[in-house]
Image (spheres, rainbow, N blue to C red):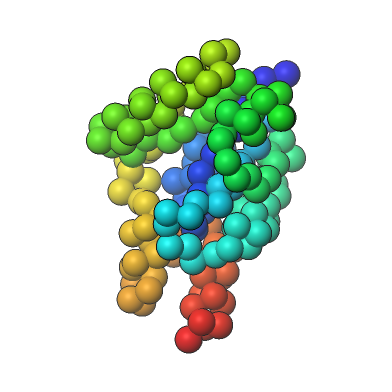
Amino acid sequence: MRHAVYPGSFDPFTNGHLDIVQRAIKIVDAVTIAVLKNTSKKSMFTPDERVEIIREVVRPYPQVKVEPFEGLMVDFCRTHNIRIVIRGLRAVSDFDYEHAIFLMNRKLLPDLETMFFMAGSENSFISSTIVKEVAHFGGNIADQVPPFVLESMQKKKNTDA
């Protein structure tokens, strides 16, 4: 069984993220979305909220699990016996950063492989940071996030107001 991990902070989970998951499950048997507690980013949602939101979004895909994680992704992979990492690339500029991570992961876990998925043109401009910023100022992000994510963001904004 080919089991892959798709790690990230996913704050919020966008249509670009969902597109990568939908394409990955055509190639691997199972995907675990590993939701990172990223202390270097200002988060809209807590890690537990992100896990629950993403679980709802991927509910139609029984081969997709969502788990929180903290620490090194290679340790998560060892614990879950995963040897494939899924990563999305929006632009050439993403490659340098992702390549450095790939090299370090291979050093730490030599049999770990990384599969890069290029974002489709309809998703290449979407980033969680930009989506949060546009939403904060009342812009329309309905075509950039799944409906449940949009609803969750609106509830969060109303709660924080």
**Image quarter for residue 88?**
top left
Q: Point out the residue furthest to the left here.
A: 93
In the image, what residue occupies the spot 51% across and 82% down? 160
Drawn side of residue 62 relative to residue 32, left or right: right
Q: Point out the residue furthest to the bottom here.
A: 161
Q: Quadrant of the N terminus?
A: top right
Taking 158 as reference, is 108 above or below it? Answer: above
Drawn side of residue 79 relative to residue 160, left or right: right
Q: Is residue 140 at all visible to an observer of this figure? A: no
Residue 27 x %, y %: 58, 23
Taking 107 as reference, is 93 above or below it? Answer: below
Q: Is residue 137 at all visible to an observer of this figure? A: yes
Residue 23 x %, y %: 53, 32
Residue 81 x %, y %: 71, 24
In the image, what residue occupies the spot 36% across and 51% down? 126
In the image, what residue occupies the spot 48% across and 86% down? 161
**Image quarter for residue 28?**
top right
Along the line of sight, which residue is nearer the eye, 134 or 94?
94
Q: Point out the residue furthest to the top here.
A: 111
